[in-house]
Image (tube, rainbow, N blue to C red):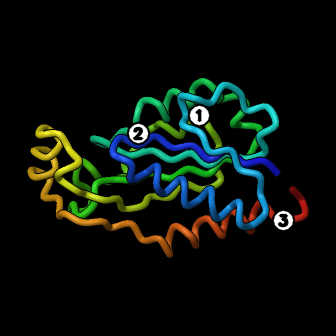
Amino acid sequence: MKILVTASSKHGTTTEIADAIAERLRAAGFEVVRQAPQDVVTLDGIDAVIIGSAVYMTQWMETATSFLQRFETALNRIPVWAYSVGLSGVPKHSPQDPSRIGPVLMKVHVVHHRTFPGRYVPSKLSLRERSIARLAGAVEGDFRDWNDIDAWTDGIIKELSKPSR
């Protein structure tokens, strides 16, 4: 089984999660293609997709939404899992809450969508981004829970390993 793992990331946090997911899938015996969404030219031969995106101002990144639009028909024929990564250390329901991504996934059937906290390292951000984060009350630090990410990936592995696939 061949799985595409793709992610849109501005400062690397979401990409690092995609890399960890891809490695765990490989360790479980799956063939994994790890590409940025804008570099994917076909889904021919792909049996499942895992797509992730950083969330900025309640929106997925344009490269991720463009991927979903370009491959909408094909994505509705294969299993798709999605994850969002948002600014961490911000109160729930603030503008950066990654569960408020809007209608980006409405046209593609997604087996499961998961939100993960990200990382806030001010030195990696522009002045504008730091200002927005400060106004939102962000707390500096890496809030990714690698055990949680592994557990979510293990659920995907279990689902894809079922004999009916």
Place of residue 156 in the rendered image (x, y in percent of width and height, measured from the top left):
68, 62
| In the displayed structure image, the side of residue 15 where residue 158 appears, left or right | right
Marker disc for residue 60: 2
Q: Are marks 1 and 2 in contact (CB under 8 Å)?
A: no
> Which residue is pictured at 79% across the width and 45% down the height?
47
Q: Can you identify the residue that label 3 sits on?
A: 162
Report x, y in % for residue 97.
30, 54
The disc label shown at residue 32, or none: none
Inspect this view and state whether residue 113 appears: yes
In terms of sequence position, does the residue under pointer 3 or pointer 2 come before the other? 2
Which one is in front in this view, the residue at disc 1 or the one at disc 3? 3
Disc 1 target residue: 107
Question: For the residue labelled by badge 3, is the local secondary structure a helix, a strand or a loop?
Answer: loop
Residue 142 place in picture, x, y as percent: 30, 65
Q: Amino acid at mark 1?
A: Lys
Residue 110 visible at all: no
Depth check: 62 or 92 in front? Answer: 62
At horizontal 65% and vertical 70% (from top left) the residue drawn is: 154
Image quadrant holding the C terminus, namely bottom right
